[in-house]
Image: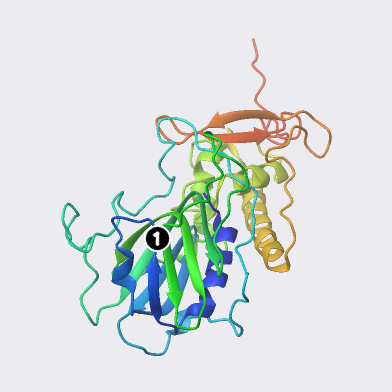
Amino acid sequence: MPEGPSVRKFHHLISPFVGQQVVKTGGSSKKLYPATLQSLWLQDTQVHGKKLFLRFDPDEESGSPGSNPLPEPPQKGARKEETVAPEPALGPSRLKTSDESCPSVELDPSGSDVPEGLGKIPATGAPQWLQVSFGLFGSVWVNEFSRATKANKRGDWRDPVPRLVLHFGGGGFLAFYNCQMCWSPSPVIKPTCDILSEKFHRGQALEALGQAQPVCYTLLNQRYFSGLGNIIKNEALYRARIHPLSLGSLLSASRREALVDHVVEFSTGWLQGKFQGKPQHTQIYRKEQCPAGHQLLKEPLGPPGGFQRLTWWCPQCQPQVPPEEPQQLQHP
């Protein structure tokens, strides 16, 4: 699924539409009835980790300070930026997203067979926040639709079908692909755990990494590292020279601090590259050798009964036991 930098780029693309009215809708969603959004005004958009929050109101009003609208509207033909395609999650939870908080059902205007409060748009006058959680290949396109780049298993060149399409009074439109949506009374924002937020709390992150479990499990926990995905996990661990199965409780404070530094540094650099139109640069993700020329190992790793994510590491650059913390010799 798209990681923090990609979702923030989606937020950047959506922001120019803040303050505009939805004049036409479309999309394949059967539980979120697209027509319920028609005539509403997009008043704000916020981002947290891997999730987007869009505020809709029935009346025109000034956007809230959190919308951060951009000075220029998107140009015709503008599109979402391409990223390295993530690999599928392995194991029994393959079809679920690792930080899923939306119910599996979306919105049904009739409210039938849908939990109370989920199938109805919030009451008039109340904030109407639409939470968007992206799937494995989720994306947002502006003023154009995604096109097939290769044939599917049946040999058909069928274009992906957007889940939701919003046309605005200004003439442009947004197309959302492979995502789940649900109404929320307010955006669930916890900037202290968002790796790309200025309010990211390093102390909380370091404490979480000190748990007696493999650090590769902790890094993907969105409660502590919101926005961090498998690409960032692999790259940060390699740059910190830490084996993915190293127990956090056995790592020194300095090594945990270095790992957090690399998480933030790589994520920030990835986001800046997106805005500058530069391709993403990875050192070991989906590679056969590390920059030093060593052969990489690849294995699905994850907590028992949880998500198994393909993990790349270098057994020479990332030894199981950190050099400064060798195992004690066993005396006879």
Q: Nearer the viewer, residue 217 or 33?
A: 33
312 lies left or right of 169: right
Residue tagged by mark 1?
A: 27
In this view, 74 is above or below 284: below
Q: Quadrant of the C terminus?
A: top right
At 41% from the left and 39% from the top, the residue drawn is 95
At 65% from the left and 26% from the top, the residue drawn is 327
- Badge 1 density bin: few <14, some 14–19, many ≥20, Cα 10 Å: some
Q: Quadrant of residue 266?
A: bottom right
Residue 210 visible in this rendered orientation of the protein: no
What type is the residue that disc 1 sits on? Gly
At 24% from the left and 59% from the top, the residue drawn is 108
Residue 127 visible in this rendered orientation of the protein: yes
Q: Quadrant of residue 188?
A: bottom left
Q: Nearer the viewer, residue 3 or 257?
A: 3
Task: Give the percent coordinates (x, y) of residue 64.
Answer: 42, 84
Q: Nearer the viewer, residue 73 or 211?
A: 73
Q: Secondary structure at mark 1?
A: loop
263 lies left or right of 170: right
254 lies left or right of 211: right
